[in-house]
Image: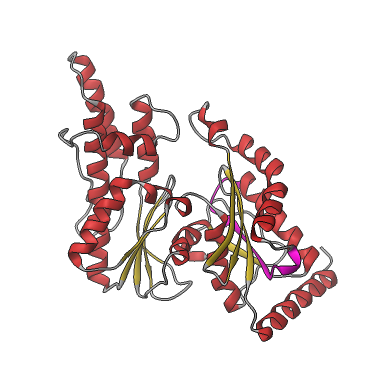
Amino acid sequence: MNKTYTSRYEMRVQQAYETHKQSGEPTYILGIETSCDETSASVVRDGKEVLSNVIASQADIHKRFGGVVPEVASRRHVENITLTIEEALEVAGKTLDDIHAIAVTYGPGLVGALLVGVAAAKAISLARGIPLIGVHHIAGHIYANRLVEEMNFPLIALVVSGGHTELVWMKEHGHFEILGETRDDAAGEAYDKVARALQMPYPGGPHIDRLAHEGVPNVPLPRSWLEPGSYDFSFSGLKSAVLNTLHNAAQRGETIEPANLAASFQDSVTEVLVEKTLRAVREHGAKQVLLAGGVAANRGLRERLQNRCQTEGIPLVIPPFTLCTDNAAMIAAAGFIKYEKGQFAALDLNGVPGLSLSDH
């Protein structure tokens, strides 16, 4: 792009930002999320009040494939993105004239899916002369909690989703220090693979969670604590243990009650997640725990973490189910922090499928 033209764009953006900041009026951010198989757009006021949060899910489309097909997801995003943005504005009772910035997920995620959202955000930013804000997908999940309750620093965030399992230390807004992360299968991946072994449809996590509440955790399964003092996670061995248990039982002609196996699997996963989180709280002097990510909707994890935090006397914040899965309200909430700091992206913003939270 012509440098002079880019400079004019940057001048318009800075002018719009300064004019709005001086006005003292509320800040309306349009959030866009297309990292995987949900096309979502949202309007959020001052980083906390959700005026709209429209989600066009593709779950039914990918169900027959047993997982998300990237090319299919990208094409569906192209079909849905304009309509989703228009609906989000209509539900919020706003037009683009009322929007002060565009916040968009630019990583991590499926590169084709990310590019659809990023392209739409850049087009609106350029056309309207308003700031463009690139948001890390996991930062969005963490800031979904701020739509429920104010953050109290320093804090520990437990992020559990289909592709991510991380313990994050935050000493202030926008500061993310990863204490531990998954070394192989994330918790959500393990849930889906175990669900597949039990012949349950995709996505498998909710089905395992439901079944676990009907069973008793009486099947011996390992807990992967790793090295002493480690905050990292590993669920590949646990997944393999479940598969071996089913295989060995079949060879012996025995039947394992699926509900008991699901309960035992969930008990192993949640124990490791919760105990490592509480140890991080104690060792870092955190004032608050945040649960974030798609697996934050898991009832077994929510209940166990609530009970342990209550016992330890540490405040816990968990988003409602609607804000646990991928959505644009969380992206707008995280984008508001960057807006307040004047941290804007340039028009060369690109989708970064392997984006690190530490580099955000």
Where residue 223 appears, as percent x and y from the top left, is: 20, 44
- Residue 303 seen from this side: yes
Is residue 203 shown left or right of residue 282?
right
- Residue 184 seen from this side: no
* Residue at the farthest bottom position: 22
Is residue 48 shown left or right of residue 165?
right
Where residue 170 appears, as percent x and y from the top left, is: 39, 71
Where residue 150 appears, as percent x and y from the top left, is: 42, 72
Is residue 211 shown left or right of residue 320?
left
Where residue 325 appears, as percent x and y from the top left, is: 47, 49
Identify which residue is drawn at 35% across, 39% down.
190
Q: How many labels does the image show?
A: 0
Please tell me in which quadrant of the rendered image residue 179 appears.
bottom left
Work out whether residue 36 or residue 50 is closer to the camera in this orientation and state it: 50
- What range of the chain is rendered magenta? 96-111
Placement of 128 over or under 163, stated as above or below: below
Placement of 135 over or under 35, stated as above or below: below
Work out whether residue 209 or residue 220 is closer to the camera in this orientation and state it: 209
Is 110 one of the magenta-colored residues? yes
Identify which residue is drawn at 26% across, 48% down.
270
Is residue 180 shown left or right of residue 12?
left
Please tell me in which quadrant of the rendered image residue 78 appears.
top right
Identify which residue is drawn at 20% across, 20% down.
249
Work out whether residue 348 or residue 114 is closer to the camera in this orientation and state it: 114
* Residue at the farthest top position: 253
